[in-house]
Amino acid sequence: MKSRRIQVLDPRLTNQIAAGEVVERPASVLKELVENAIDAGSRRIELELEAGGAKLIRVRDDGSGIGAEDLPLALSRHATSKIFSLEELEEVASLGFRGEALASISSVSRLELVSNREDDPKSGWRVVAEGRQMEPRISPAPHPRGTSVIVRDLFFNTPARRKFLRTEKTEFGHAEEAFRRLALSRYDIGWVLRHNQKVIHQLRPGDDDLAREKRLGALLGKGFLDNALHLDLEASGLRLWGWVGLPTHSRAQADQQYFFVNGRVVKDRLVAHAIRQAYRDVLFHGRQPVFVLYLELDPQLVDVNVHPTKHEVRFRDGRLVHDFLFSSLHRALGETRAGTVQTGRV
Ligand code: ADP
Ligand code: MG
């Protein structure tokens, strides 16, 4: 290649490069928009998709809203209201903090955001961005308190990426799975998911056992709870609660495994290892356990700034976490081994 001069990249291009890391398909857009709605303190989040999300993804919340003066910034890169210092990064409790999602998504789609911080439903502002770095245009637009983000024609200006999109059914499957994880992360939020004008899920908020079990049934099927143990254990400042499937209820695929760390969906090798070990001598070779587990610990003991999608974490004391997970699960499963429990609570 001919040697050329070094140049600083155009901002639109840097956003599109960043989008390569976080925006893989409609499901990733859904995740980012919903995480923002959760961070805004929403009690109710409604999602609407068309054509698997490739044509349209709309997320509407009743959270804090964004003021007119902040709206253009919301779409710029490295602009966030969630952290302001390294100290805050080290104990971040919000799902977002990189200030990249809206900038990335708007660089590869037609994005519209309408928001209102006031209680007056006649006030509100709209900002539109269309795949290019331009001064975002702001105009008045009524909206109840909260925010709606509408993402149309994902990858319309990046044909190479659009080619990677699969069929509508496959893309919706990924989007629904992302929805499932998010809805399992916050029982206190009410949710609606629509696809092509049809209601796919409608979940009432509720933070008591009954409401949680109802949601698990709706999202994972009734069979899940009939074959799961409930557990809630605490030691050394760590709490693990949730449901683990009985060894007899294993699956061929690892497709019903949900692990949350401080409300964030996490895929972690250390966690996976501890769970595998705990199930080792109760599960047939090659079978996969099912579980929905919540680990809660001091945010300072876990680093979430490992990867742009934030699916990975780093525990300050990995050994402690591993041993706690292993012993909690081993104990819970041990009671099934001894034949004292069928399903129910530990
Ligand atoms: P991050 O979430 O990492 O801060 P984003 O690009 O996802 O970055 O969002 C940028 C900013 O826009 C957020 O910090 C927040 O202030 C604001 N914002 C985005 N979505 C919402 C929403 N649904 N409700 C309220 N504020 C929002
Ligand atoms: Mg965000």
Image (cartoon, helix red, strand yellow):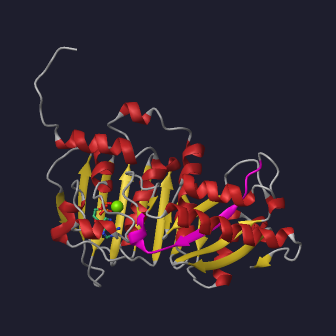
The one of 327 and 93 positioned closer to us in this rendering: 327
Quadrant (top left/top right/bottom left/bottom right) for the C terminus: bottom right
Ligand 1 positioned in quadrant? bottom left
What's the residue at 44%, 47% (across, down)?
55
User: Image quarter for residue 275?
Assistant: bottom right
Residue 26: percent from left, percent from top: 46, 49
Q: Is residue 306 magenta?
A: no
Does residue 319 sit above or below 335 in this rendering? above
Residue 170: percent from left, percent from top: 59, 44
Q: Is residue 298 magenta?
A: yes
Residue 307: percent from left, percent from top: 39, 51
User: Image quarter for residue 179?
Assistant: bottom right
| Left or right: 314 as drawn, with respect to 171 | left
The one of 301 and 33 positioned closer to us in this rendering: 301
> Where does the magenta region start and end?
287-302
Q: Residue placed farthest to the top in the image? A: 2
User: Image quarter for residue 64?
Assistant: bottom left
Residue 230: percent from left, percent from top: 71, 75
The one of 258 and 29 positioned closer to us in this rendering: 258
What's the residue at 21%, 73% (across, down)?
67
What's the residue at 74%, 72% (across, down)?
332
Quadrant (top left/top right/bottom left/bottom right) for the N terminus: top left
What's the residue at 18%, 61% (across, down)?
72
| Left or right: 233 as drawn, with respect to 156 | right
**Can the viewer see residue 95?**
yes
**Can the viewer see residue 193?**
no
